[in-house]
């Protein structure tokens, strides 16, 4: 009698276990591994969970047995054409579905996965939906500078200085938040003004800090760095919290929200929106920053 190799049996058992997972369990596992364990904001976890539950409800209502690329595209087109959802909402759900399908494929729960084609008609409409206006950008950074100048406690001034440097790196240099969190003190060369950025999959690139004002604040922050060091193995990170630990994605969002509110900006933008806004105002704002 032929017997299957042990490795094949284990694979088949693992596949059956994955197939037995309910939709809610798949969502929970995805949110845990892709959101919570990566230190992302709780609001992000709730938004991902809500979007995916809504999608599975639609599958059930239309008696669609399984999720795949074409089904995901049909769902997005349904949201766009029948439910008349806002462009920004459709694009956000598109991104969540893209991440989710990639996750299912890596877990062996999808036989094949190719990138979802987003609803083309909504892309152009959504581009400006999450971009800060020129006046909003001006008042955002003005609120940070005003607080920095008016604070009378030296440690709070150092915290504010750190926040200014981070937000200006996000905006003027388009650095991803994950890249910002990976920066180390040794990545910045004071003499040349060059900053080494560590991207995904070990890729690196250099950014030249073109602004004298930003260079000056970067050097001030590095000089003040010792006040945040706690000899706990994290001192090499460029940006530290008040207790000497690396900042998280959630903390960056909270910092951004603080100054957004101080600036009187009512719309709930994100740090990513600040980063993306640079594309629209690049030439004008670069001239101002370097002038």
Image: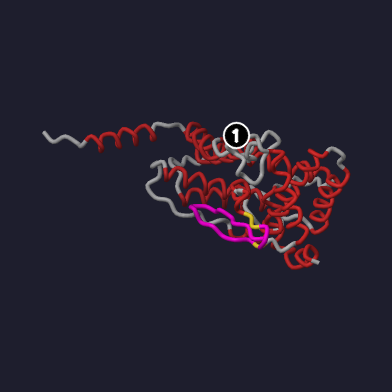
Above or below residue 93? Residue 45 is: above
Give the magenta part as a residue range: 190-207
Tally of numbered tags: 1
Q: Give the answer, above or below, for where 64 lies relative to 187.
A: above
Judge by depth and name the residue closer to the eye, 14 or 118: 14
Corner quadrant of residue 239: top right
Query: Where is the N terminus found, in terms of image quarters?
Result: top left
The picture quadrant where one finds residue 226 is top right
Query: Which of the 4 quarters of the picture holds residue 191?
Result: bottom right
Q: Quadrant of the C terminus?
A: bottom right
- Give me the residue at 45% from left, 54% from top: 114
Vertical side of 198 occupied by 208: above or below: below
Other-residue count near label 1 (Cα within 10 Å), few / some / many at <14 / 14–19 / ≥20: few
- Asked whether residue 82 appears in the rendered view, the answer is no
Residue 275 as seen in the image, left or right of residue 138: left
Q: Is residue 164 above or below residue 25?
A: below
In percent of width and height, residue 96 lies at 56, 46
Q: x, y percentage for residue 79?
A: 60, 48
Residue placed most toward the observer, 46 or 192: 192
Judged left or right of residue 33, residue 3 is: left
Residue 120 relative to residue 275: left or right: left
The residue to which callout 1 is attached is: 232
Residue 201 within the segment the image draws in magenta: yes
Q: Secondary structure at mark 1?
A: loop
Relative to residue 227, is residue 123 drawn left or right?
left
- Residue appearing at x 55%, y 41% in the figure: 55
Q: Point out residue 94 in the picture as x, y percentages from the top left corner.
A: 57, 50
Res 28 seen here? yes
Q: Position of residue 151 (x, y in %)?
A: 86, 41
Q: Nearer the viewer, residue 196 or 73?
A: 196
Is residue 162 covered in magenta? no
């Amino acid at each position: 009698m032929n017997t299957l190799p042990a490795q094949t049996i284990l694979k088949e058992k693992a596949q059956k276990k994955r197939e037995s997972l309910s939709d809610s369990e798949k969502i929970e596992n995805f949110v845990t591994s892709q959101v919570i364990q990566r230190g992302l904001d709780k609001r992000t976890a709730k938004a991902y969970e809500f979007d995916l539950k809504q999608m599975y409800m639609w599958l059930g209502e239309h008696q669609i047995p399984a999720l795949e690329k074409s089904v995901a595209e049909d769902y997005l087109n349904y949201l766009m054409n029948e439910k008349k959802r806002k462009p920004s909402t459709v694009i956000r759900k598109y991104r969540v579905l893209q991440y989710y399908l990639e996750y299912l494929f890596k877990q062996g729960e999808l036989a094949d996965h190719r990138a979802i084609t987003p609803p083309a008609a909504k892309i152009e409409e959504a581009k400006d939906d999450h971009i800060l206006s020129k006046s909003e950008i001006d008042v955002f950074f003005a609120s940070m500078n005003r607080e920095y100048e008016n604070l009378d406690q030296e440690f709070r001034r150092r915290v504010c200085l750190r926040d200014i440097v981070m937000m200006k790196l996000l905006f003027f240099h388009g650095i991803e938040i994950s890249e910002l969190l990976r920066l180390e003190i040794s990545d910045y060369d004071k003499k040349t003004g060059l900053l080494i950025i560590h991207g995904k999959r070990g890729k690196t690139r250099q950014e030249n800090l073109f602004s004298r004002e930003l260079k000056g604040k970067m050097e001030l922050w590095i000089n003040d760095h010792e006040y945040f060091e706690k000899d706990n193995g994290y001192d090499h990170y460029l940006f530290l919290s008040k207790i000497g630990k690396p900042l998280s994605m959630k903390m960056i969002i909270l910092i951004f929200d603080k100054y957004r509110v101080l600036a009187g900006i009512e719309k709930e933008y994100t740090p990513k929106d600040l980063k993306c806004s640079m594309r629209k105002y690049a030439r004008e704002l670069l001239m101002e920053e370097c002038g």
